[in-house]
Image: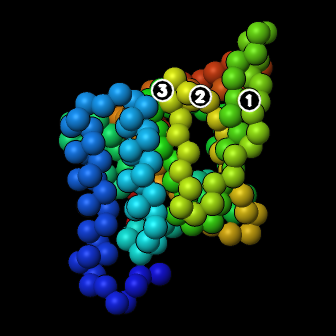
């Protein structure tokens, strides 16, 4: 809900300021671990105020989760996406192939990591992680890149903000099945109404 004590232009600029700060971080050509560490701080600052996400990029769909592009870096270094989860919605088991930061804006989501077992099948890796508003989790091929994500609530919408080390809607990734087989996919983006 917008804070009426602040001018609309300042509220609108929160995402713009985040993008500028993240661009400056990437210009330092830091190692991935530092990008994840400092980028997580920047994302937590963006999540601290829930008044900047346009309504058109916060709408759920009853059939499937929505992935709205908020920003694509012109140089292809990163993208910012809002994920809008309808009640009970979840992803298949999937990977990203690039580093990513997942931050909770509204509601909550559950993330279950997976890894390939010795027999090639997919098996759960670690405990389920629950993200609440303001919390950030990282994924990457170097720290764990395969997971399944779901809305923690069966009766309300949840929204998370994701930052990836590429234009994630154009990256070829994979969906994994329990038996270890996979299917390539490119997610694209939901078009706001």
Q: Classify mark 1: residues with Cα within 10 Å, few (<14), some (14-19) or many (20+).
A: some
Q: Earlier in the sequence, mark 3 or mark 2?
A: 3
Residue at the spot 74% in from the left edge and 43% down from the top edge: 128
Element at label 1: loop
Q: Is residue 183 above or below residue 147?
A: above
Colour scheme in use:
rainbow
- Mark 2 lies on residue: 144
Q: Which residue is mark 3?
A: 97
Q: Is residue 169 left or right of residue 91?
A: left
Q: Where is residue 78 drawn, in percent x and y? A: 33, 40
Asked if labels 3 and 1 touch by Cβ distance under 8 angstroms, the answer is no
Please identify the quarter of the rendering in which residue 31 is found.
Answer: top left
C-alpha span from label 3 to label 2: 10 Å
131 sits to left or right of 154: left
Marks 1 and 3, the one that precedes in the sequence: 3
Do the CB atoms of the residues marked 1 and 2 lie less than 8 Å apart? Answer: yes
Residue 87 marker:
none
Mark linked to residue 125: 1
Percent position of residue 103, x then y: 51, 53
Q: Quadrant of residue 74?
A: top left
Establish if 83 lies above or below 186.
below
Query: Which quarter of the figure is the C terminus placed in?
Result: bottom left
Image coords of residue 112 (percent x, y):
71, 39
3D distance between C-alphas at marks 1 and 3: 18 Å
């Amino acid at each position: 809900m917008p804070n009426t004590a602040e001018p609309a232009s300042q509220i609108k600029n929160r995402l713009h300021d985040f993008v500028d700060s993240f661009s400056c971080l990437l210009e330092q050509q830091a190692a991935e671990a530092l990008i994840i560490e400092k980028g997580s701080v920047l994302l937590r600052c963006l999540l601290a105020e829930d008044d900047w996400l346009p309504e058109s990029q916060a709408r759920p769909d009853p059939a499937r989760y929505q992935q709205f592009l908020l920003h694509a870096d012109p140089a292809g270094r990163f993208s910012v996406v809002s994920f809008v989860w309808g009640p009970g919605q979840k992803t298949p088991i999937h990977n990203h192939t690039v580093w990513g930061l997942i931050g909770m804006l509204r509601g909550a989501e559950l993330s279950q990591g997976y890894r390939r077992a010795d027999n090639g099948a997919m098996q759960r890796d670690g405990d389920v992680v629950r993200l609440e508003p303001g919390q950030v989790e990282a994924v990457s091929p170097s720290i764990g890149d395969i997971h399944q994500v779901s809305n923690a609530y069966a009766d309300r919408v949840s929204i998370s903000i994701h930052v990836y080390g590429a234009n994630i809607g154009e990256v070829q990734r994979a969906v994994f099945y329990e038996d270890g087989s996979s299917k390539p996919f490119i997610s694209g983006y939901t078009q706001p109404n």
